Image: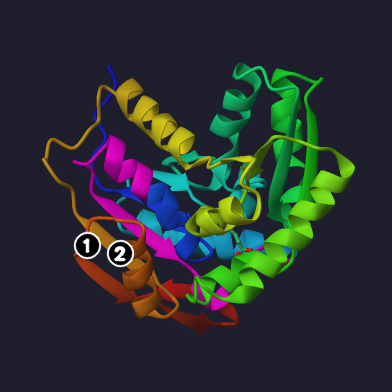
């Protein structure tokens, strides 16, 4: 007999990007309490080494675990591409943002798809491997951006540099193949999806967030319907960065207004670092 899970859903990301996952969770599961961790002090993650990312990811997950989450939905594609490093270390379910969209791409019958993501995500090959585990014939034309996540995380969503970087990376993808569908494989990118559409009106840009939210719903259903029976859940944001940027991004994305935005401090004890309130 399965025990029902209780507690909030944790969502983590290197910065504001994972709020695009919160948007879909609040749409599909509005009764769920959500605790969000955005590590803007250490953003961008996409240019870091595996060792640094393992340390940062474990620290965020420990923070969420200490806050009693019943599961964690990864917003971060970069950390999702190395999720096997985290799963054995935590008792609660960790849900990758990449696995559900990879399954969806294969089910949709596409034979070629573009992928724009961080440099780490592209070079790690997690998207390519998971898509090919469903259908090895799908051509994934991938390009990493060294800049876009950090530009978005600064909070000036109208910065002309954002369009310039989108054009640089998208032109590269299209020069390799004229794909019609492109996955936004970094959670920061759907925040500026209108910029992508304005620059490339004929391309279908795919936001993985909705498939991550369905995966969360399916997991909670599989755990004896461990849903929160409220009309509207609470929404707490924790960040190591500027809280105002989170307030602005939440508004821009039409999220429930955060009940609280807490600033997380980084503490060093015996040269190990921890996130604390
Ligand atoms: N938003 C994260 C992702 O989805 C990481 C972006 C970054 O910090 O480089 O990969």
Q: Secondary structure at mark 1?
A: loop
Query: Ligand 1: which quarter?
Result: bottom right
Q: Is residue 144 above or below residue 178?
A: below
Q: Give x and y (percent) for residue 35.
A: 31, 56
Question: Where, by quadrant of the figure, is residue 258 drawn?
Answer: bottom left
Mark 1 — residue?
257
Residue 61 visible in the picture:
no
Residue at 31% from the left image edge and 23% from the top image edge = 221
Q: Which mark is residue 251?
A: 2
Q: Give x and y (percent) for residue 76.
A: 55, 53
Please state the extent of the stretch shown in magenta in the rendering: 23-48
Residue at 61% from the left image edge and 65% from the top image edge = 149
Q: In the picture provided, is 238 more to the left or to the right than 138?
A: left
Q: Residues within 10 Å of mark 1 (few under 14, many from 20)?
A: few
The question of residue 29 being in magenta is answered with yes
Q: Give x and y (percent) for residue 205.
A: 59, 42
Which comes sooner in the sequence, label 2 or label 1? 2
Q: Is residue 138 above or below residue 129?
A: above
Q: Are marks 2 and 1 in contact (CB under 8 Å)?
A: yes
């Amino acid at each position: 007999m399965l025990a029902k899970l209780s507690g909030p859903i944790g969502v983590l990301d290197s910065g504001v990007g994972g709020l695009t996952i919160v948007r879909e969770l609040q749409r599909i599961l509005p009764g769920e309490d959500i605790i969000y961790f955005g590590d803007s002090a250490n953003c961008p993650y996409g240019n870091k080494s595996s060792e640094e990312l393992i340390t940062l990811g474990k620290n965020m997950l420990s923070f969420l675990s200490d806050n009693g989450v019943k599961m964690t939905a990864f917003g971060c594609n970069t950390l999702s591409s190395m999720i096997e490093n985290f799963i054995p270390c935590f008792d609660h379910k960790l849900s990758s943002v990449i696995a559900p969209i990879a399954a969806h791409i294969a089910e949709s019958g596409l034979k070629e798809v573009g992928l724009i993501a961080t440099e780490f995500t592209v070079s790690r090959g997690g998207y390519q491997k998971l898509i090919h585990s469903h259908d090895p014939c799908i051509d994934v034309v991938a390009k990493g951006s060294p800049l876009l996540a950090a530009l978005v995380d600064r909070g000036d969503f109208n910065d002309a540099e954002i369009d310039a970087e989108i054009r640089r990376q998208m032109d590269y993808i299209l020069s390799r193949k004229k794909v019609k569908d492109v996955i936004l494989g970094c959670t920061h990118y759907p925040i500026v999806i209108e910029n992508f559409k304005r620059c490339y009106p004929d391309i279908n840009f795919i936001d993985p967030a909705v498939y991550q939210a369905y995966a969360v719903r399916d997991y909670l259903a599989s755990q004896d319907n461990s849903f929160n029976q409220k009309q509207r859940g609470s929404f707490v944001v924790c960040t190591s960065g500027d809280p105002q940027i989170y307030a602005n991004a939440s508004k821009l994305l039409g999220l429930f207004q955060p009940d609280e935005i807490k600033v997380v401090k980084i503490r060093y004890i015996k040269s190990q670092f921890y996130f604390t309130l």
